[in-house]
Amino acid sequence: MPDSRPEVAPATAFADAWQQTGSLDALRELTDAAARVRPVVARQARLSESELSALEHLVRGPLGPAELSRLLEVSTAAGTGIVDRLAGHGHVTREPHEGDRRRTRVMVTPSGREEVLLRLMPMFRSLQRLDESFDEHERAIVERYLRGATEAMRAVTDPPTDPPTDRPADGPA
């Protein structure tokens, strides 16, 4: 008698066999909480999420407008609008590029830096206390787990150029 059960697709079969552990549960909670941080901070600072994201990039160092647009994944016109609004708030300035006077650099101002850091300070303090509660060996394990989790997420956000396939390379299309 033939098997009348429908074939289970590979992704569904994997999901059905998934074993949820405490560490995976905690990772899900962390990613959910992290996804809520930027909208809340942006709202508190009366900025758009794109403007806040731009400030976060600029706190690390000055960027050209086109480079900032690429990091924000917006058009150069949209990036210019974001910089214009941040400049209007007094959070960034445009300065000539020291090596090429035709180019400009966008630099965060002290008020722009303070806007980002002040609102994130409670999180930074809590994370510092948590990190200090671990010894070097425990920190190494946590770091390995978090870096591995980051790479796992990049499998979705930065997928390979060739789509995955379940058929052999020499098999039929």
Image (cartoon, rainbow, N blue to C red):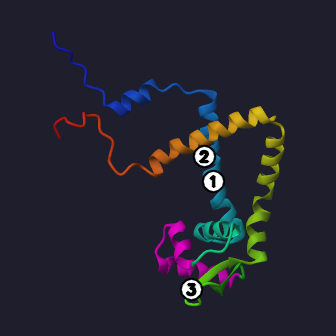
Q: Do the residues labelled 1 and 3 touch (CB within 8 Å)?
A: no
- Which structural element holds mark 3? loop
Q: Which of marks 2 and 3 is in front?
A: 3
N-term mark: 1 or 3? 1
Rounded to the nearest whole Å, what is the CA distance between mark 1 and mark 2? 7 Å
Looking at the rendering, the stretch of residues picked out in magenta corresponds to 65-89
- Which structural element holds mark 1? helix
Q: Left or right of 51: which side holds 161?
A: left
Q: Left or right of 73: which side holds 100?
A: right
Q: Name the residue under label 2.
A: 32
Tag of residue 166:
none
**Residue at screen point 25% across, 34% down:** 167
- Viewer-closest of 103 and 22: 103
Identity of the amino acid at label 2? Answer: Asp
Residue 83 place in picture, x, y as percent: 60, 80
Identity of the amino acid at label 1? Answer: Arg
N-term mark: 2 or 3? 2
Q: Of all residues shown, which one is farthest toward the top?
A: 1
Q: Left or right of 1: which side holds 79?
A: right
Judge whether residue 139 is colored magenta. no
- Viewer-closest of 106 and 25: 106
**Residue at screen point 63% across, 31% down:** 23
Rounded to the nearest whole Å, what is the CA distance between mark 1 and mark 3? 35 Å
Residue 138 place in picture, x, y as percent: 75, 33
Residue 148 place in picture, x, y as percent: 57, 39
